[in-house]
């Protein structure tokens, strides 16, 4: 993978025309499970015709599970990458299913040596099936596993060393883990292998009874933008992308959010 991505936004069907007309959108990301590679939405075809990179972002591969990733899911991700001429594919370091039961959420993987060995094998399977590089995202957590043997940064660092996988660092998720689990976001940045950074996620959320919920339905809080600035002080990220998944604001409000992200990057 080479080249810069710039500043982008998550493409959603509800804001397809907004994304098309927003100024300064350098790249977009689409949830892979929500598109058919043989029948791409017209808006994505328009963006691709303009030369805007489109990254398929998977949410259901379940690389953190004991079972190997399903061949059909890998084939779908690969087909999306080809149809979109994508520079890379992204997914999560997460547990999502077991024994045919779906968790309905991206759950954290126990940071143990045993879990790392399984995850490593699953990542290698995914890399072999994909025509482009794979980047993996850190998830937001509402709980931690008592048997954890490593910090998240150590866990991801070893995964990168073993597989060569790229990182998608979600600074909003780092902030979520800081609030909910007491894991300092800046300390994580200092320990992560940021030289292998593919791009960055930024999003807003809501606090309820002392718990931060990464809902992707609100303006990005200043504390999250500060984590982004801290990241940019350590590395020049190839791309930074705003996620907004529901309760969509006006075009002007989304444009203002992208400007806030650019400002945070510049401060870094």
Image (cartoon, rainbow, N blue to C red):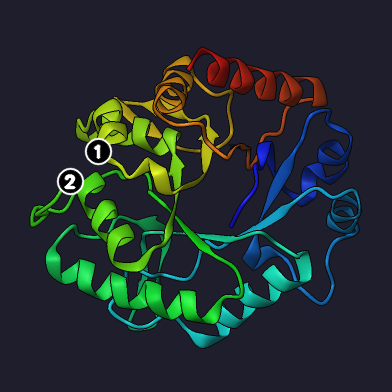
Q: Residue at x 80, y 48 (%)?
A: 52
Q: Residue at x 70, y 70 (%)?
A: 80
Disc 1: which residue: 191
Camera-side mark, 2 or 1: 1
| Vertical side of 8 occupied by 266: above or below | above
x and y percentages locating residue 168 in the rendered image = 47, 48
In the visual, does 153 lie left or right of 254?
left
Can I make out residue 179 in this image?
Answer: no
In the visual, does 18 lie left or right of 124?
right
Q: Secondary structure at mark 2?
A: loop
Can I make out residue 41 in this image?
Answer: yes
| Vertical side of 2 occupied by 194: above or below | above
First in sequence: mark 2 vs mark 1: 2
x and y percentages locating residue 212 in the rendered image = 36, 31
Q: Secondary structure at mark 1?
A: helix
Q: Residue at x 21, y 33 (%)?
A: 183
In the visual, does 66 lie left or right of 151?
right
x and y percentages locating residue 237 in the rendered image = 52, 35
Give 199 or 204, whichever is nearer the viewer.
199
Disc 2: which residue: 151
- Marks 2 and 1, how far apart in space? 9 Å
Q: Are marks 2 and 1 in contact (CB under 8 Å)?
A: yes
x and y percentages locating residue 186 in the rendered image = 29, 26
Q: Residues within 10 Å of mark 2 (few under 14, many from 20)?
A: some
């Amino acid at each position: 993978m080479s080249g810069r991505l710039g500043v982008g936004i998550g493409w959603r069907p509800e804001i397809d025309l907004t994304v098309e007309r927003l100024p300064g959108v350098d790249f977009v990301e689409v949830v892979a499970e929500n598109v058919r590679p043989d029948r791409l939405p017209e808006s994505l075809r328009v963006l691709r015709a303009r030369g805007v990179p489109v990254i398929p972002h998977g949410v259901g591969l379940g690389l953190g599970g004991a079972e190997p990733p399903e061949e059909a899911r890998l084939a779908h991700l690969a087909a999306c990458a080809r149809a979109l001429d994508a520079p890379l594919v992204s997914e999560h370091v997460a547990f999502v299913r077991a024994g045919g039961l779906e968790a309905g959420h991206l759950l954290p993987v126990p940071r143990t040596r045993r879990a790392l060995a399984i995850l490593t094998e699953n990542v290698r399977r995914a890399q072999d099936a994909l025509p482009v590089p794979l980047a993996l995202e850190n998830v937001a957590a509402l709980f931690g596993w008592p048997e954890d043997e490593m910090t998240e940064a150590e866990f991801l660092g070893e995964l990168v060393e073993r597989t060569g996988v790229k990182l998608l660092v979600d600074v909003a998720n780092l902030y979520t883990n800081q609030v909910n689990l007491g894991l300092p976001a800046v300390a994580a940045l200092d320990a992560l292998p940021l030289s292998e950074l593919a791009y960055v996620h930024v999003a807003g959320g809501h606090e309820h009874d002392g718990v931060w919920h990464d809902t992707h339905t609100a303006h990005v809080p200043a504390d999250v933008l500060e984590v982004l600035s801290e990241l940019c002080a350590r590395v020049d990220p190839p791309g930074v992308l705003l996620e907004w998944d529901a309760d969509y604001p006006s075009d002007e409000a989304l444009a203002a959010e992208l400007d806030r992200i650019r400002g945070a990057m510049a401060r870094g």
